[in-house]
Image (spheres, grey):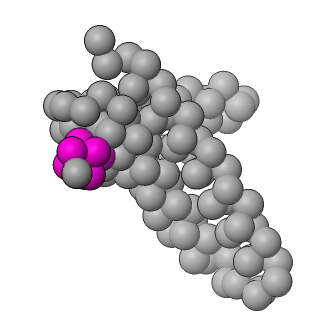
Amino acid sequence: MFIPAVFSGLLYAWVVLALGCLFAAIASLLLDLNQGIMPMILTWISYAAVIIGGLVAGRRYKRRGIIVGGVVGLAYVLLILAIGSAGGGGMEGISTIEALERLAFSIAAGALGGILGVNLGAS
């Protein structure tokens, strides 16, 4: 069963997300970044977190990296959507197309990380 590998991948993804957001916030304060680019930066931090989470899950499970990583990406985006909708704003802040794009890119990023994790773990 690959559930423990998925949970460890999600844990790493959330840690990377938290650290990335912290660094982005500090950089925004110190460098006086244009606030228009912050959503793009945070999106890329999110995808990097999913890649790392997929890599950890694939490396831990040692096989089927594309599936394990994809499940990490799927679970990650579903948690993001659940937290966002539970925050009081509901789902009004995200369009259906945007949610589907985020879902597809997160699954692909997790699968890529899972493939890398299995192949890096073999060496």
Q: Name the residue located 63 percent from the left edge and 60 percent from the top edge.
A: 20
Q: Name the residue located 43 percent from the left edge and 19 percent from the top edge.
A: 4
- For the N terminus, the quadrant is top left
Q: Is residue 18 left or right of residue 112?
A: right
Depth check: give the residue in front, 68 or 26: 68
Which of the 4 image quarters holds residue 75?
top left
Q: Name the residue located 68 percent from the left edge and 76 percent from the top edge.
A: 35
Q: Name the residue located 82 percent from the left edge and 83 percent from the top edge.
A: 30
Please tell me whether residue 118 belongs to the stretch shown in magenta: yes
Numbered range of the magenta stretch? 116-122
Q: Main secondary structure of the magenta part?
A: helix
Q: Is residue 33 left or right of residue 42?
A: right
Q: Is residue 37 left or right of residue 18?
A: left
Q: How far across and how far down the image is residue 19, in percent? A: 67, 56
Report the residue that reaches farthest toward the bottom. Answer: 31
Report the residue that reaches farthest toward the top. Answer: 1
Q: How far across and how far down the image is residue 114, in percent? A: 27, 42
Which of the 4 image quarters holds residue 11?
top right
Residue 74 at least partly seen: no
Q: How far across and how far down the image is residue 67, in percent? A: 21, 31
Give the tally of numbered discs. Answer: 0
Q: Is residue 25 above or below residue 16?
A: below
Residue 49 at least partly seen: yes
Report the residue that reaches farthest toward the right. Answer: 29
Q: Is residue 40 above or below residue 71?
A: below
Depth check: give the residue in front, 29 or 14: 14
Please tell me whether residue 57 belongs to the stretch shown in magenta: no
Q: Is residue 115 above or below residue 22?
A: above
Q: How far across and how far down the image is residue 32, in percent? A: 77, 86
Depth check: give the residue in front, 68 or 103: 68
